[in-house]
Image (cartoon, grey):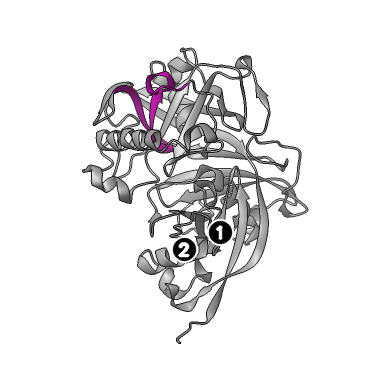
Amino acid sequence: MSCSAQIRIPATYMRGGSSKGMFFQLQDLPERCRQPGEARDRLFLRVIGSPDPYATHIDGMGGATSSTSKCVILSRSTRPDHDVDYLYGQVAIDKAFVDWSGNCGNLSAAAGAFALHAGLVDPARVPADGICVVRIWQANIGKSIVAHVPVSQGRVQETGDFELDGVTFPAAEIVLEFIDPSDDGEDGGALFPTGNLVDELEVPDVGRFKATMIAAGIPTVFVNAEDIGYRGTELREHINGDHAQLARLEKMRVAGALRMGLIRTAEEAATRQHTPKIAFVSGPKDYVAAGGKAIRAGEVDLLVRALSMGKLHHAMMGTCAVAIGAAAAIPGTLVNIAAGGGARSTVRFGHPSGTLRVGADVARVDGQWQVGKASMSRSARILMEGWVRVPADSF
């Protein structure tokens, strides 16, 4: 009987916002995994424990949800005015697939903190006490993120009294700024790829729906909750067990991806599960969040539910929050209409675990909407550090 010894790789397990994942320094990866390709993907699949037909990730570090099946690579940046390069991989649970098509906004907070923990920021730029500005190059989408990380006695301050709905314990606040977050890469173009604030989206075997399709933070397809039979107050248990409705929502996501020009054929969506997101919005209503917290209609501007990797997210993806903030700031989008219309620079929305405030600076330039930056607060904390072990023949 043949067997393969396990190897160990330096790794840090971190929470960032309402997500968590495995963090690696590029230089610590096995040599053949330091470049994009099959070896790197197979390594991360084995680290997380995918593909797992039992959807438990018992034999890996994943948590069997889209929020906990993530890997991150950081390295010193060679780009001017940036400290680190940050690359993010969303690992599928039941498929042998790692999606590199987008960013994770929640783990962006952890990327800033990890950069300091790992000594990737010039010590001369790190204050003894105060706020360290970490300049991050988000390599997946080619954008800059600025993380304002609290520092105490020259080290990252992780504990504090900042509370984030969807996260059990308070921690230190990290303010994130997503600079020019609209998608101007090779896949996208304008902030609104279709050229419209609202489109009629024809979905095969489902019907016709109004949709706002925006490429900010992460490409997102917004629809009205009422148009698809929801109130906007739903929690995970109301949706994730309804396989027929999840299939309908996936068809809507695919139709949006086609309309936005992110894929050429519907079949390509299987290789782009992380983007775009599908989300539904409604006006403010009373509801009870997942942790038992009562949310009153007067506390929020609108309600938003979003799906990640085919399931309703337990809170809200950070990048999708950027899309919400940008769309809410632009009069005429479905998000803006759900929030009551008019111009606004900030919005507080209700999600399955509570509420979140996000801001966006928008302007109309030469007839086109542009987003200068979007901002929100998150937190991050090291959960474990040391080595992760995988069989040597698994990648």
Q: CA distance from mark 1 to mark 2?
A: 9 Å
Whole-percent x, y for residue 125 in the image = 64, 53
Quadrant in the rendering for residue 363: top left
Q: Is residue 370 above or below residue 342?
A: below
Q: Residue at x 61, y 33 (%)?
A: 353
Question: Which range of residues does the magenta coloring cover?
Answer: 208-230
The residue to which callout 2 is attached is 44
Pointers 1 and 2 in contact (C-beta within 8 Å)? yes
Badge 2 density bin: few <14, some 14–19, many ≥20, Cα 10 Å: many
Dot 2: what SS?
Answer: helix
The three-letter code of the residue at mark 1 reads Met
Q: Is residue 221 magenta?
A: yes
User: Residue 326's mark?
Assistant: none
Q: Is residue 174 visible?
A: yes
Whole-percent x, y for residue 394 in the image = 44, 73
Q: Is residue 100 above or below residue 285?
A: below
Quarter in which the C terminus is drawn: bottom left
Quadrant in the rendering for residue 218: top left
Most common secondary structure along the magenta stretch: strand
Q: In the figure, is residue 201 to the left or right of 45?
A: left
The three-letter code of the residue at mark 2 reads Phe
* Closer to the camera in the image, 24 or 55: 55
Judged from this view, the residue extending furthest toward the left is 265
Q: Is residue 171 magenta?
A: no
Whole-percent x, y for residue 194 in the image = 27, 29
Judged from this view, the residue extending furthest toward the right is 153
